[in-house]
Image (tube, rainbow, N blue to C red):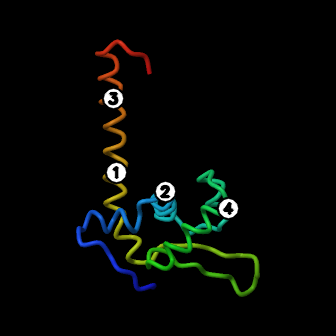
Amino acid sequence: MKNKTLAVNPVAVVIQLLGAKWKILIIQRLLNKEMRFCELKKSLGCTAKVLSNCLQELEQDGFVIREQNEDEINRVEYYLTDIGYTLKPVIDSMYEWGKDYKKLRKLMLRKQGQSI
């Protein structure tokens, strides 16, 4: 784990470590199962460069482990560390909030007479 200076405010720490939208989505995917790079790329729809950078940062910050299969040189899998799994309730809350927001926004737009 790389030693970096963290923000003073705890919310700022979260944003500092996970502010990129892809990082949260990577962790969300890895909560379900370990995945190979190509599986993550396909499920997320981001570029290989972005995914590679995010995975490296997540690994350096202690959220993800990169494991290369010794039998197959090209088989690399990613999975969450114990610290990574502590984000499950946070991501679950974000999921629920996003779902609720979409419903509320739909209602607000209907009241305003706008189409979605």
Mark 2 touching mark 4, by CB under 8 A? no
Question: Which mark is in front, 2 or 4?
Answer: 4
Viewer-side residue, 33 vs 23: 23
Q: Position of residue 48 (x, y in %)?
A: 67, 61
In the rendered view, would you say 4 is above or below 93?
below
Q: Categorize mark 4 by other alpha carbons within 10 Å: few (<14), some (14-19), many (20+).
A: some
Q: Secondary structure at mark 4?
A: helix
Answer with mark 3 or mark 4, whichever residue precedes in sequence.
4
Answer with mark 3 or mark 2, whichever residue precedes in sequence.
2
Q: Position of residue 70 (x, y in %)?
A: 71, 87
What residue did someone put label 2 on? Answer: 25
Answer with mark 2 or mark 1, whichever residue precedes in sequence.
2
Amino acid type at circle 1 is Met
Q: Categorize mark 1 by other alpha carbons within 10 Å: few (<14), some (14-19), many (20+).
A: few
What residue did someone put label 3 on? Answer: 105
What residue did someone put label 1 on? Answer: 94
Q: Position of residue 104 (x, y in %)?
A: 30, 30
Mark 4 touching mark 1, by CB under 8 A? no
Spatial separation of the CA atoms under disc 1 and disc 3: 16 Å
Q: Categorize mark 2 by other alpha carbons within 10 Å: few (<14), some (14-19), many (20+).
A: some
What residue did someone put label 4 on? Answer: 48
Spatial separation of the CA atoms under disc 3 and disc 2: 22 Å
Amino acid type at circle 3 is Arg
Amino acid type at circle 4 is Ala
Viewport quadrant of the N terminus: bottom left
Spatial separation of the CA atoms under disc 2 and disc 1: 11 Å
Viewport quadrant of the C terminus: top left
Q: Secondary structure at mark 3?
A: helix
